[in-house]
Amino acid sequence: MTGLNAHLPALQVVVPLLIAPLLILLRPRGLAWAAATAASAMAFAIAVQMTVGVLDGQEYRYALGGWSAPYGIELLVDSFSALLLLIVTGASTLALLAGKASLDSEIEPRRQPLFYSAWLLALAGLAGILVAADAFNIFVFMEISSLASYVLVAGGPDRRALPAVFKYLLMGTIGATFYLIGVGLVYMMTGTLNLADMELRIHEVADQKPILVAAGFITVGLALKAAVFPLHVWLPNAYTYAPHAVSAFFAACATKVALYVLLRFDFVVFQQNLTGHEEQFAAYLMPLAVLAILFGSAVALFESNLKRLLAYSSVAQIGYILLGASLLSIGGVSASLLHMFNHALAKGALFLAVMAIATRYSQLDLQHLAGAAKRMPWTFSALVVAGLSLIGVPGTAGFISKWYLVAAALEEGVLGMALVAVIVVGSLMAVVYIWRIVEAAWFAPADKSADDPGGSVREAPAAMLAILWLAALANVYFGIATGLPRELATAAAISLMGHLP
Amino acid sequence: MELLGLYHYWVFVVLLMTGFYAVVAKVNLIKKLIGVSLFQSAVFLLYITMSKVSGGTAPIVLPGMVDPLYSNPLPQVLILTAIVVGISTTALGLGIAVRIKEEYGTTEEHEIQEIDRR
């Protein structure tokens, strides 16, 4: 067992990557789904196994092909990667388990093997970014996951997904190319691609200008990928018109992986090597984070399509994550990482609920959902639980991360008070937009004209409901037993902040 | 004169901005894709120029070479991967453009928005 244990970082990527092409051969109905789910569950098991190891204080380092770093390609799993790996593989597994019925109705049987193959490629790419300790490998995995996710988003029956995905492709490619330029410039000055090695060698670089330019390119490029305000314009339409299961998968994890690269690159490579970089980092990202919170929440207030509403809420939540990181204190960074985990739980559960609703209602406008809660009480109750977590009500996971975020902000004095005000305003706006869903679903008179002429709409399929409630209850569980994510987030924050001068 | 001596960087910058301009300013989806292609090619050139060591030769070990000076092969390998990524992106983008043409009957961005608004 110990032999296998050492290979876990590689297996994390290799399992989905190798099963992906095999899926195309699995033509019989349902088989491709079963294989994809099994592969995803196996990836989740690997992530859990590594998390256990990381909690024991172990760091997984893996030299691919036996070539040791810095000359060979290195894989590295520490507490930061483990936290994100849990999110990515968990979201993929839950979305696949719950999404069978929904995907069957949205994807023709003929194309299903290809679709699930793309799903596993996206999973492998995202996992690859998280285990790679090498700037160029991160780029390659980023492009694998992006290309696969364009296919997934465009895979549904809604033709509006096509222009949305085209925009996503253009902006995603520009983001990745910016990142590539930045990596090129750093390589030019240091002659290495290994992140840890870069950190050491940049010390010796006399002329800081190219490094500064590289920091700019990398930050902007990854901000594009992470949909940081104002570079978020690709996100709402891509999430809205994607197949519902894909929305649940990506809303939980896709942008957070780009944020992971942004934080890791910036803290490990740039922070201690560029004079005054930490102030520039904070001064550049904090206003954007504040604007993202206010703008995303405000747009969600007026959005009438359920998925678009949640997508704009995601833009706001990315703001909270960035805000914590831009405080540049251990408390702030760990609150930010904790919020990655908790927001993934809340938003993943919300999009699973949307998927359950979409199996019964063809239109997801709030007015079409009038009175829907009376027909699907279990689905909408789960949606409310996840919604409370998104708002940050005590007793749910969302409360924990916002609490830490507020505590970290208060350490900053007067500026901190202003930031707390922003967090409170953002949360209040979240109360309002979640309430709009509740009001429409519970209190509005049922819409007889829509999909439901005879009041025949039933509750969502039982399997889907079970997974949905599992996700919703996870929000409550991690709101009370905060140990696991908090421990990982704190350890990751301490290791990231350890790179500061 | 020093500015002219760095002409390979100028080629990179001009190509990069030409491509970027096309992506941002053109409304035709195919033209946007051409822009993305140019944009990516510019970065390929950046990597290729940085691998050149003046006076260096191809990094192949041959018998009888005394104190050889080699160009750096690593950026070329990296960019080979990036070229593959670039081609896949362009191919996928064209594929989506074809699907958009099938569904909407046009590849002009404003016309697609017009149709969606209806």
Image (tube, helix red, strand yellow):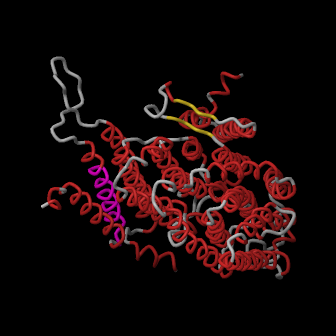
Please say if A402 is above or below A206: below
Residue A163 on the magenta segment: no
Please say if B104 is above or below A445: above
**Percent position (x, y) of residue A365?**
68, 75
Horizontal arrangement in the rendering, residue A79 relative to residue B78 (left or right): right
- Residue drawn where x is 65% and y is 65% of the image: A324
Q: Nearer the viewer, residue B79 or A284?
A: A284
**Percent position (x, y) of residue B103?**
46, 65
Horizontal arrangement in the rendering, residue B22 relative to residue A256 (left or right): left
Q: Farthest top residue?
A: B63
Residue B39 on the magenta segment: yes
Residue A367 shows in the view:
no
In the rendered structure, which segment of residues is drawn in magenta? B27-46
- In the picture, residue A238 is in which quadrant? bottom right
Q: Nearer the viewer, residue A460 or B29?
A: B29
- Quadrant into which the N terminus of chain B falls: bottom left
Please say if A196 is above or below A168: above
Horizontal arrangement in the rendering, residue A398 relative to residue B13 (left or right): right
Horizontal arrangement in the rendering, residue A307 relative to residue B14 (left or right): right
